[in-house]
Image (cartoon, rainbow, N blue to C red):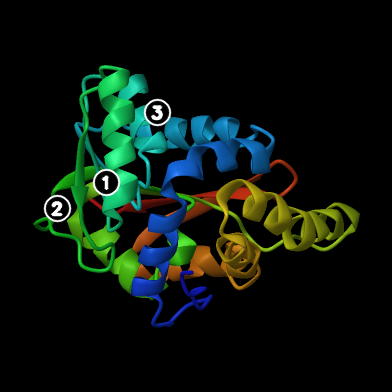
Amino acid sequence: MTKRPAVGDKQDKGSDVQAMFASIAPRYDLLNRVLSLGVDRGWRRAAAHEALALKPARVLDVATGTADFALELKTRAPQAEVIGSDFVPQMLAIGREKAAARHIDIRLEEGDALNLPYPDGSFDTITCAFGFRNFADYARGLAEFHRVLAPGGRAVILEFPPPRPGLLGSLFRVYFQHVLPRIGGLISGNAGAYSYLPESVLAFPEPERLAGLMRATGFRTRYRLLTFGIAAIHVGDKLP
């Protein structure tokens, strides 16, 4: 059984996160659809619209997992070069199978989000969909995004913020903490992985705090909440 990773910022959790996602890779896509009731597809569409608004020629999807978002981007912008980067080989292998089955030409490469294997200014757009909260150091991850972006480039982060105050937030918190781990554990065989998910969301910065981290890195930043605050899109533009 894999060790449940630590949650939050400034945590030594990289190898534990890697092992956890390797263990659930075969059922990861199915679980995403079931646990989000399919709403995650709409969130990805909204994030893709922001990511492609400036018509980028080169796009890097960080923490690409099984490449759902990288495939979405390439489908919407076939003229763009899309690269997906992740440090879990088992997830990338599934992404490559999906890309081949759909005859979509993307590159999927192993890489550490905190030490991206690309030169400065390599990409016009960088995206990260539901992977940023797994980073061991948020500021370092943002610094890497900023480094490999070309001047005038854009970073788009799609993530789960902590549930907001109020009735809906309370209901979502109950679902996330009690229902989701049970379903996830039954389907994946790894209950710990789906206990980690709600814990990592509860430990994640509030949207305004994440926006502040992005501004401190040098991004011009805005964000918007989706589906009553269950998800959020943060957009950071690097100054020309």
Name the residue that disc number 2 marks. 121
State the SS at label 3. Answer: helix
Q: Is residue 50 rendered to the left or right of residue 154?
A: right
Q: Position of residue 112 (x, y in %)?
A: 24, 63
Evaluate if marks 2 and 1 touch, with contact meaning CB atoms under 8 Å apart: yes
Q: Quadrant of residue 79?
A: top left
Density class for disc 3 (Cα within 10 Å; few <14, some 14-19, many ≥20) is some
Name the residue that disc number 1 marks. 153
Q: Amino acid at mark 3?
A: Glu
Disc 3 from disc 2: Cα separation: 23 Å
Query: Can I make out residue 32 in this image?
Result: yes
Name the residue that disc number 3 marks. 72
Mark 1 vs 3, N-terminal side:
3
State the SS at label 1. Answer: strand
Q: Position of residue 216 (x, y in %)?
A: 40, 72
Residue drawn 33% across the image and 38% down it: 94
| Extreme-left residue of the structure | 119
